[in-house]
Image (spheres, rainbow, N blue to C red):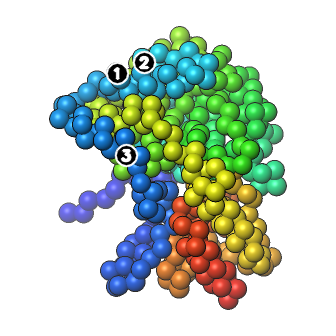
């Protein structure tokens, strides 16, 4: 008797934790130390969770052993609603759903919407969960290109050309993973205008909305389009460095009367998974109401900002490598000039780098980027570790032929 995976998985792809991980694990088991630059997990790089979050969670633990309301506990949903009210949005506690990270909510939001064959516009490169979840839900991920020569902003003409009568929604990831782009107001408005003209739901993945460098300003899609149904996703994993708690939220704004039936479906999916992890729900109010220490980390002299600077500088020093300066988030997405490096298979490139240098990055095609000429590196390690790692990547590249 052989048990085989469902054919529904045959087109689903999620490379951030993909097959290269098995090789990395094997190397570690053989006694090597592997520098894992593949997942945006701040805890692995010595970022500590704000103490008030931990203290609050510990204090509330005795009350957090039962299931909660499927949408989440009231105090946390109220704190989330207030966060968006300060942006001028009309948000009520009933518009907020808490989830086991943004990941779970993305999956629910997409599943609740799609019929087989329906299309969602998703950026390329993307955070690949969006594509994977769309495919798993029987939908078609249609990728609109982001333009590296224009600071990785979405190409609105490309997006417009890809809208069909099956297009149901558009995904905006801002600040962006993997490129680090933070979109100017006009770009967000351009996307919203297309959504308005074509009757699309907007999924705004804004999990990095507080991780901004230099003069970057985050423009919330929901705040710019109160006339559109927008689902905004955010959570504690990155800004509050507690990715392991699995704590996120989804906020519904706009003319909800046009989404009544959809929201009933979403509510049913929320009930089917009973509730989000209860102790982590208690962390939300403490996080949102506490000291926003992320600002010190991203300000000049702050750890995240210095690391971003180091990664960007050192990547650009490698011959045949160029990197747009990330304005937000925790990543850089450098380009490998095909005339210099001639990489035909970027998964092989990433595996060869791992085997030779014991450094694990993720290939660009893992983010649904169409050609094998990019990779993503985290800007989470200490600046000196990044400098050393990028130096090793440069040495590796100088002798690398496929
Ligand atoms: N959205 C984006 C753009 C991300 O980069 C990530 C994690 O890396 C997530 C969502 C998932 O976050 P969570 O830990 O809340 O599930």
Q: Quadrant of the C terminus?
A: bottom right
Residue 253 pos. (x, y %): 55, 20
Using the rendered image of the protein, determine whether residue 11 is visible from the camera's viewpoint: yes
Secondary structure of residue under mark 3: helix
Q: Which mark is residue 51?
A: 3
In the picture as drawn, the residue positioned furthest to the top comes out as 257
- Name the residue at 62% across, 74% down: 387
Secondary structure of residue under mark 2: helix
Give the answer, above or below, for where 208 lies relative to 166: below
Residue 84 pos. (x, y %): 55, 24
Q: Which residue is mark 1?
A: 74
Give the answer, above or below, for where 122 lies relative to 304: above
Q: Are marks 3 and 1 in contact (CB under 8 Å)?
A: no
Give the Cα separation between the discs numbered 1 and 2: 7 Å
Give the answer, above or below, for where 50 lies relative to 307: above
Residue 114 pos. (x, y %): 50, 32
Residue 146 pos. (x, y %): 73, 49
- Asked whether 27 or 137 is in front, the reply is 27
- Asked whether 105 or 11 is in front, the reply is 105
Q: Are marks 1 and 2 in contact (CB under 8 Å)?
A: yes
In the image: residue 275, left or right of residue 347: left
Q: Which residue is mark 2?
A: 93
């Amino acid at each position: 008797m052989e048990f085989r995976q469902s054919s529904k998985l045959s087109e689903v792809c999620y490379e951030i934790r993909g097959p290269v991980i098995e090789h990395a694990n094997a190397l570690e088991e053989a006694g090597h130390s592997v520098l894992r630059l593949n997942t945006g997990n701040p805890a692995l790089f010595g970022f500590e969770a704000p103490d008030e979050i931990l203290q609050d969670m510990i204090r509330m633990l005795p009350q957090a052993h039962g299931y909660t309301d499927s949408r989440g506990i009231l105090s946390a949903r109220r704190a989330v609603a207030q966060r968006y009210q300060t942006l001028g949005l009309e948000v009520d506690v009933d518009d907020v759903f808490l989830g086991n990270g943004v990941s779970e909510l993305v999956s629910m939001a997409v599943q609740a919407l799609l019929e087989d064959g329906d299309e969602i516009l998703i950026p390329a490169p993307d955070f690949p969960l969006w594509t994977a979840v769309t495919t798993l839900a029987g939908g078609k991920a249609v990728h609109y290109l982001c333009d590296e020569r224009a600071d990785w902003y979405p190409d609105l003409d490309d997006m417009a050309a890809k809208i069909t009568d099956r297009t149901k929604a558009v995904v905006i990831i801002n600040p962006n993973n993997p490129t680090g782009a933070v979109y100017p107001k006009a770009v967000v408005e351009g996307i919203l205008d297309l959504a308005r003209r074509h009757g699309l739901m907007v999924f705004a993945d804004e999990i990095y909305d507080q991780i901004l460098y230099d003069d970057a300003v985050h423009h919330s899609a929901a705040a710019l389009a109160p006339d559109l149904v927008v689902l905004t996703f955010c959570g504690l994993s990155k800004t509050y460095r507690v990715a392991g708690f699995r704590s996120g939220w989804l906020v519904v704004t706009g003319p909800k009367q046009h989404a009544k039936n959809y929201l009933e479906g979403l509510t049913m999916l929320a009930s089917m998974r009973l509730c989000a992890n209860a102790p982590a729900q208690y962390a939300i109010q403490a996080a949102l109401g506490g000291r926003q220490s992320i600002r010190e980390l991203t300000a000049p002299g702050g750890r995240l900002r210095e690391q971003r600077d180091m990664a960007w500088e050192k990547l650009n020093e490698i011959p045949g490598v160029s990197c747009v300066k990330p304005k937000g988030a925790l990543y850089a997405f450098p380009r490998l000039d095909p005339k210099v490096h001639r990489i035909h298979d970027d998964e092989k490139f990433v595996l060869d780098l791992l085997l030779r240098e014991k450094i694990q990055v993720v290939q660009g095609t893992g983010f649904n980027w169409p050609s094998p000429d990019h990779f993503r590196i985290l800007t989470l390690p200490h600046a000196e570790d990044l400098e050393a790692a990028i130096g090793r990547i440069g040495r590796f590249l100088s002798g690398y032929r496929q």
